[in-house]
Amino acid sequence: MTTPAPVRQSPTTGPELIARARALAPLLEEHAAEAERQRKPVDAVIHALEEAEIFKLMVPRCYGGLELDLDTFFEVGAALGEGDASMAWVANFYVEHNWILSQFPASFQQELFANRSYVLAPAMLAPSGVAVREGESYRLNGRWQWASGIMHGDWVIPGAMEQTPEGRPDPRWFAVPRSQVRVEDTWYVDGMSGTGSNDVVIENVHLPTEQSVSIVEMSTGHGPGSRLHAGPLYHTPMLPILTMAATTPALGQARAAVRRFREGLEDRVRLGARTKMKDKASAQIRLARVEVEVREAELLIRDVVADVMTRRDTATMIDRARWATQSAVAVDRCRRVVQSVLEASGAHAHFLDHPLQRASRDLNTISCHIVFDLDGRLETFGRLLLGLDSGGALL
C-alpha cells in the first residue's frame, strides 16, 4: 500500500499577512505604554508577531519564508505603526534584517536558515567597529549604538570597516551570534523608548569570512543574494528597504493621530462653550488639513514603493536620491501632522500617558534618523539634479 504524499500547505499570501498585521495593531496599542515603561518590546507582542509570520515576510521561500515584496512590507509596517511606532520599528527592522542576511554568502545562509525560517536580529549601520582580516576569518572589535531589537535578538548584524590591502576602507556587515556580544543598558531616551535600542559591545570575536558581506555591493542591489535568489526583491538596493522600515511607523502613528482627533471631536465641548467642537469651523478646517496632509505623506511613500519595485538595481543615483528625499519629506509631514493634532487636542493631551504625547515623542525621535535628514536629502537631490556629485551621501 502506497503512503500518500503529505499535502503541502500554501504559503501565506500578501493580503493574508496584511490582514494579520491590521488585526494585531490593537494589541500593539494596548501594550505600547508598557513597552515604553520597560524600555523594550513586550514579550507577548513579539510572540504574537511570530505566530502571525510577520518576520518571515522577506525570507526566501527556499528557507520557508514568504518572499513577499515591498508593497506588502509597506502595508504591514503602516498597519503595525498605527498600533505603536516603537514595536512597528522593531518588527520592520527584524523583517528587513532577514533580507540583509539573505544577501550573505550562500554557505552561511544555508547554515543559518537550516532549521528556522527567520531570525530576530538588530543591525547597526554605522561602521563604528573595526574588522581585521586574518586568513579565512575576521577579528571584530567595537561598540555600536542603536541596536533596535537587541532585547529579543538571537543574532546581531554590526557594520564595521575593513582596511583592504590597498589601504581602502571597505564597510561590511557581519553576522554575530547574540551569545558573543555584550549588551549595555543605555536606552534612556525621550522617544521610541519601547525599541530597547541599547548599545552592543564586541571584543575580539573571530568570524569566518562567510559571515560577512560588502555594504557597498548591497547598496546597489548586487550583493551575493542577488546571484543566489532569482526573486526581484533580492535585486533591490539596500537603502530604500531600510528607509521604508523606518518610514511606515511614522505614517501609521500620523494616521492614528488623525483618527483619534476626528473621534475626539464628536463629543468634546470646551469649557464655557455651548456647541461641540465638531460644529466649530476651526476644528473642521484643522481636521480637513491634517487628513489631506497625512494622505499626501502616504502617497509620497507609495510612489517610492512603486518606483523602487519598477527600477530595482537599474536605478540611477538621481532615482535613489529622489526616493530618499521623498521619504524624508513624508516623515517630516507625518511629524507635523501629529504636532498639529496635539496643538488642537486640549490640555488633556499633555498628560504623559496620553497616546498623542507618545506619538509626538516617537515621531520627533524618528525624524532624527540619519536617513531623514531633510536638509541633507534636499541638498543631495539638488546637487544631482544640477549634474554635481552626491557629496558622499548615503543612498
Image (spheres, rainbow, N blue to C red):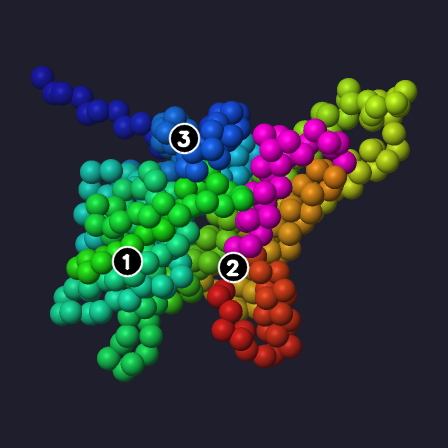
According to the picture, the residue beneath numbered tag 2 turns out to be: 370
Q: How many marks?
A: 3
The answer to the question of whether label 2 and label 3 lie on touching residues, with beta carbons closer than 8 A, is: no
- The question of residue 359 being in magenta is answered with yes
Q: CA distance from mark 1 to mark 2?
A: 21 Å
Q: In this picture, is 277 found above or below 73?
A: above
- Write down the quadrant of residue 368 in the picture: bottom right
Name, please, the residue furthest toward the left. Answer: 1
Q: Amino acid at mark 3?
A: Val
Q: Is residue 187 left or right of residue 137?
A: right
Q: Tell me the tag on residue 174.
A: 1
Percent position (x, y) of residue 47? 36, 28
According to the picture, the residue beneath numbered tag 3 turns out to be: 42
Percent position (x, y) of residue 315? 51, 64
| Residue located at (52% from left, 34% from top) | 84
- The question of residue 151 being in magenta is answered with no
Who comes first in sequence, dot 2 or dot 3?
A: 3
| Residue located at (53% from left, 75% from top) | 391
Name, please, the residue furthest toward the top. Answer: 1
**Magenta stretch in the rendered image:** 344-370
Q: Give the mark toward the camera: 1 or 3.
A: 3
Q: In this picture, is 98 found above or below 347?
A: below
